[in-house]
Image: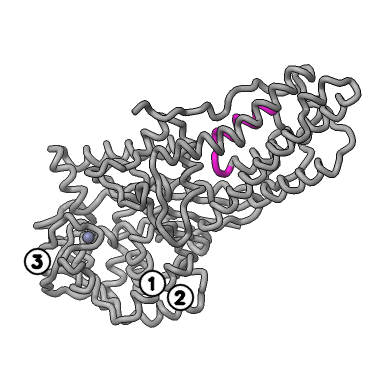
Amino acid sequence: MKSYITTPIYYVNGSPHIGHAYTSIVADIMKRNRRALGYDMMLSTGVDEHGQKNQEAAAALGMEAIAYLDMRCKEFREVFDLFDVDYDYFVRTSRDAHKAAVASMEQTIFDKDLIVKKEYTGKYCKGCEEFKRDSDLTEDGDCGLHPTMKIEESKEINYFLKMEPFREKLLQHIEDHPDFVQPNAFRNELKKMLAEPLEDLCISRPKSRVTLGVELPFDPDFVTYVWFDALANYLTTINWPEGDYSAWWAECEHLIGKDILKPHGVYWPIMLMAAGLPLPKKLSVHSHWTGEGGIKMSKSIGNVVDPNEVMDLMGVDALRWYLARHMRAESDSQISVELIRQTYNSELGNKIGNLLSRVAKFSNKNFDGKVPVAGALTGEDEALRKLVLEAAAGFGEWIDMPDIPARIQAIVAAADAMNEYIDQQAPWSLFKNEDTRERCATVLYVTLDCQRVLFEALRQVIPGSAEKALAMLNAPAPASPWKAELDKLPGGNPLGEIDSLFPRVNAPEA
Ligand SMILES: [Zn+2]
């Protein structure tokens, strides 16, 4: 069983931001989930190094393009490592094999007479790096995605891919494969994009304007339009066309933000059809992050969440937890450093981390540094164990992108139940009396073993902290493939060193 998950490759004309963090972290969670289920996994992420925007960013710093790209690429890789994203392949579109494959795909399509050269006059958005129809623009004549960039009237000779011959076929594919685009809101949006005849897609840029790109194999005066080049990475990463790519390709799932639905849902499938290649299995689309109050993040408002700042303040798992837990499936979600801090303190700190250190420290002190040995279980014990097992079992089953918040919510609910159980059972009181000491041991064992199960599941979400928690419990290595199981923490086993898992982070002084 294989599964191949891709993130978009990111433009390197700026530093990694919260949107990059989100898609990559969610991809990582899905990879860890499927690997736990026994799948053979491939996760690719990386950077898009071509196009006018990168060329201009290098020029603005007075740098040679190559030196600029190396610098940015290193920065992205380092940040993704800090995010704990366990990628298998880091894409660079400047790689020779990638460029050769892009050119070969273009030649194949050109040879089928599906690419035409013509003069085109139109409105061009530099942000999108594409021509816009009037119906694509706002009432003020701006690009909705780039309201601060001026739309320029542009007249150019270029090469165009014929799109319309494939429109009906693509619509049919979407009908026949309801899972091809998910969630449904975005499937419907894509169908709307395909409801009207499609204009030819401009796939070149004249070298007089853009030099940073893959030269067209049939005309050296042009480079490839950056989207055509970038999208092909999903195939070149698995060694198309030379290697044994087809088994991975058949299981390919693209994770994307809704802003790039059109390139992935229209351009890319039609490029593949034109080249005679099968389509990927699935597009999983997510919404965007906004600042508090639903206000778009912007430097001028000062509500931009910098992932590095969050990690410095609270650690990577505060960031991973918030992102994974709070994205709604079909609408935008709010984020701020303060919201992350509150969630971190209340859930990871108070509900999950404190309970572990309280119970483990108490066991350590009163049971000779060992996991207490359980006696007979009561109905309350069994009820808690059932609830925890069911919550953790959600991570022993396949998780699609929109399922992630609910699976984590189940873990939080289980942690609430554990806190309630401990308050009711009060092992600290039970320990004081010789007659109830065995009952105390049972309560502690039930709690520690339940925590082990939850942290095994949470390895998929907050791997660093979960491994640390399992080390505190000195839990045996979980089986692989994994499923949630009770009673795997041996009673009488020595505990590991107990530390605070999620130290409280106070609000910065005003
Ligand atoms: Zn734009």
Q: 506 or 120, which is in the foreground? A: 506
Quadrant holding ligand 1?
A: bottom left
Q: Position of residue 55 (x, y in %)?
A: 17, 48
- Determine the residue positioned at 55% across, 43% down: 461
Crowd around label 2: few <14 · some 14–19 · many ≥20 (10 Å):
some
Amino acid residing under circle 1: Leu
Q: Are marks 3 and 2 in contact (CB under 8 Å)?
A: no
Q: Position of residue 380 (x, y in %)?
A: 81, 42
Q: Note whether 349 is above or below 180 in the view shown.
A: above
Return the residue at label 3.
Answer: 153
- Determine the residue positioned at 28% across, 60% down: 227
Circle 2: element type: helix
Q: Is residue 492 left or right of residue 227?
A: right
Q: Does the magenta-highlighted stretch encompass residue 466?
A: yes
Amino acid residing under circle 3: Glu
Return the residue at label 2.
Answer: 174
Main secondary structure found in the magenta portion: helix
Task: Point out which mark residue 190 bears.
Answer: 1
Circle 1: element type: helix
First of labels 3, 2 by sequence position: 3
Ligand 1 contact, mark 1 (Cβ < 8 Å): no
Q: Nearer the viewer, mark 2 or mark 1?
A: 1
Q: Does the magenta-highlighted stretch encompass residue 287?
A: no
Q: Position of residue 112 (x, y in %)?
A: 29, 77
Q: Are marks 1 and 3 in contact (CB under 8 Å)?
A: no
